[in-house]
Amino acid sequence: DTAVSQTPKYLVTQMGNDKSIKCEQNLGHDTMYWYKQDSKKFLKIMFSYNNKELIINETVPNRFSPKSPDKAHLNLHINSLELGDSAVYFCASSPRQESYEQYFGPGTRLTVT
Amino acid sequence: GQSLEQPSEVTAVEGAIVQINCTYQTSGFYGLSWYQQHDGGAPTFLSYNALDGLEETGRFSSFLSRSDSYGYLLLQELQMKDSASYFCAVSGGGSTLGRLYFGRGTQLTVWP
């Protein structure tokens, strides 16, 4: 049973397109996150939701819009994709907002051409 | 803001011991975590220190000195499968509650 799952695993698209990444966790956790990992492996938090409420928005361009329909799901929609958006996007979850142990999904490798 | 420094690369041979250091500067500090990431894989949690001292989990140990803003991950009896990137991450309270700020990672290569 997969704890944190993401779809799709790979996404190749052209500049200017809009795309979505979906994330689901079956751990019963309250808190979910989106991270971006660039080509140099720098892992940076983008957003966090706690019980469907946005609690962290780490100065991400407003072309990125997260949505949490329920506490087991957190999706990421990206408008007007740019070359610099190419990265691996990881979803993660943790039992509570203050948890230091986070469980990461397998990642979505986004390539913008 | 937050900044973390760790070496970019470390190499060692099977069976050896390696220490990966991490120094940090942060406003508001709860603890220091370590994550492992194999190429193409997801980060996985290894250990956490909130208090000064050593935490041991099998072959891996992690140390924290809050007064020195310093920690390290110690890997013993290295195996080939330990070749991966290792990230330290700080977590804070107050306005930074729930945020994990990661270092840039240390690529560990274990040679036979």
Image (cartoon, coloured by chain):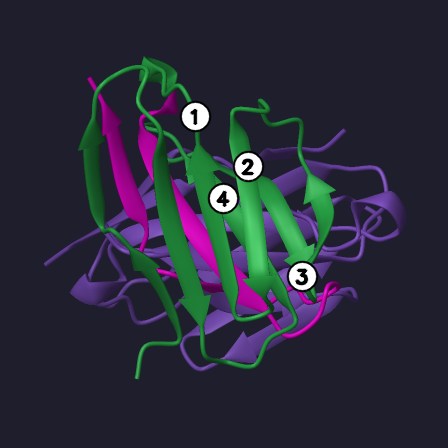
Chain colours: A green, B purple
Question: Mark 3 to mark 4: distance in Å?
Answer: 17 Å
Q: Quadrant of residue A7?
A: bottom left
Dot 2 and dot 4 within a common chain = yes
Query: Which one is in front in this view, the residue at disc 1 or the one at disc 4?
Result: 1
Picture residue at 71% right of the left edge, 50% below the top: A54
The image shows residue A105 at horizontal and vertical percentages of 38, 61
Question: Mark 2 to mark 3: distance in Å?
Answer: 14 Å
Question: Mark 1 to mark 3: distance in Å?
Answer: 22 Å
Residue beneath label 1, please?
A79
Asked if residue B36 shows in the view, the reply is yes
Picture residue at 76% right of the left edge, 29% below the top: B1
Question: Of the residues shown, which amino acid type is indicated by label 4?
Answer: Tyr
Of mark 2 and mark 1, the one earlier in the sequence is 2
The image shows residue A103 at horizontal and vertical percentages of 48, 67
Membership of A101 in magenta stretch = yes
Chain letter for the residue marked with disc 3 in the picture: A
Residue beneath label 3, please?
A52
